[in-house]
Image (cartoon, rainbow, N blue to C red):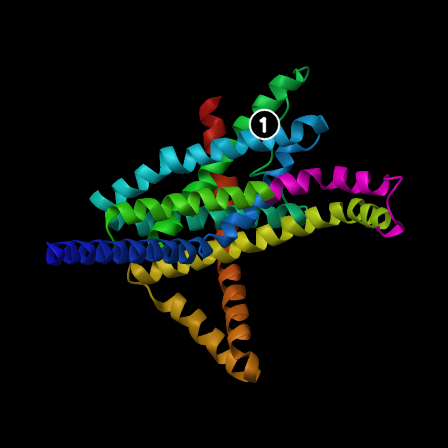
Amino acid sequence: MSTGLLALLDDVVSLAKAAAASVDDIAGMSAKAGTKSLGVLIDDAAVTPRYATGLAPARELPIVAKIARGSLKNKLIILLPAALVLSWIAPWSITPILMLGGAFLSYEGAEKVLEALGLHGKHGHEPEAEAEGGTPKTLEDQRVRSAIRTDLILSAEIMALTLSSLPPAPVWQHAVALALVGVGITALVYGAVALIVKADDIGVALAQRGDGTAFVSSLGRWIVKVMPGLLEALATIGTAAMLWVGGGILLHGLEVVGVPGPAHLVHDVAHGMGQWAGPADAALTWLVGALLSALTGLAIGLVLALVIGKAIQPLMAGGRE
C-alpha cells in the first residue's frame, strides 16, 4: 500500500516536473520569438497614435481600446489558427510568406523615406481620407476599421516571424507560444500607444497643478514641449526598424531558398568591421549588420516603389476607368 502510494507520488512529481519544463520551454520560446518581431512592433507603436489624434480627447483611450481588441482578434482568432494550419500542411510556405512580409516592410519603409525627402505623397499607414460632413461617430468607426486592417498586416508579419523562430515542439506548445507572443505584444504596443496619445493631457495636468511643486509644473511643461519631437523620433525609428527587419528577413529567406551569397556578404562585412572595435566588437558587428540589412531593405523597397508606382498603379487605375 505504501509502495503504491510512493509510486503514485513519484509519478505526480515526474508529471509536475514535465509540466514545469514545458512551461519553461514555452516561456523561453515565446521570449526568443517575440524579439524577432521588434521592428514590426516599433512600427506598430509609431503608426497607431495617428488614428486616435485629432478627435475629442475623451474618445482617445476608447479608440485605442477598440483597436487593441481588434488586434487581439486578428492575432488569436484569424492568424494563429492559420499559422498552425500552414505549419502543419505546408511548412515550406512559411519562408515565402515571410519574404513577402519582408518585401512589404521594405516597400513601406522606402515609401516613408521618399515622403520624408518630399519625393512622394502620403502613403502606407495613414488614416483613410475623412469624408466631409461625417459625424464624429462615423469618423471614429472609420479610423478604427482602418487601424484594424493595418494591424492585420503587421500582426501577420509578427505571427509569421514568431512561428519561424519556434523550435520543433508539439503543436499545442506552438499554439500557446504564439498566443503568449500575440497577447504580450498587443499589451505592450497598445499600452505604449495609450501613454503616447494621453501624454499631452498628462503634461498639461501636471503643469496646471496648483498644489504641485515647481518641479512637477516644470515636468508637465517639459512633457508638452517634447511630445511633438518624440512622435517624430518614434516615426523615424519605426521606419529604420521596418527597413532593418524587412531587409534581414529577405536576406535570411534568400539563404534558406539556396541563395546564400547576400547574407554571407553582410555577415562577413559586419564581422570584419567588428574586429576593429576591440571590446566593443559584438556591438559594432550588430550595428553594421543592422545597417547593411536596412540598406538592403531600402534598395529593394525603392525598386518595389518604382515598379508599383510606375507600372502596377497606373495599370490598375486604367482598369477602373
Measured as percent of width and height from the top left, residue 262 is found at 40, 66
Tell me the crowding category of disc 1: few under 14, some 14 to 19, or many 20 or more residues within 10 angstroms, Cα based.
many
Identify the residue at horizontal 31%, vertical 37% (top origin).
81
Secondary structure of residue under mark 1: helix
Measured as percent of width and height from the top left, residue 227 is found at 74, 46
Was residue 99 drawn as part of the magenta stretch in this picture? no
Q: From the image, which quarter does the N terminus lie in?
A: bottom left
Identify the residue at horizontal 32%, vertical 42% (top origin).
83
Q: Judge whether 176 appears above or below 289 on screen.
A: above
Tell me which corner region of the image, top left, top right, bottom left or bottom right, holds residue 22. bottom left
Residue assigned mark 1: 143
Closer to the camera in the image, 294 or 44: 44
> Is 120 left, or right, of 146 in this rendering?
right
Measured as percent of width and height from the top left, residue 123 is found at 58, 38
> Is 170 left, or right, of 219 in this rendering?
left
Is residue 162 visible in the rendered image? The answer is yes
Q: Judge whether 1 appears above or below 140 on screen.
A: below
Was residue 206 drawn as part of the magenta stretch in this picture? yes
Closer to the camera in the image, 161 or 106: 161
Range of the magenta residues? 192-215
Closer to the camera in the image, 210 or 94: 210
> Is 247 left, or right, of 77 in this rendering?
right
Q: Amino acid at mark 1?
A: Arg
- How many numbered discs? 1
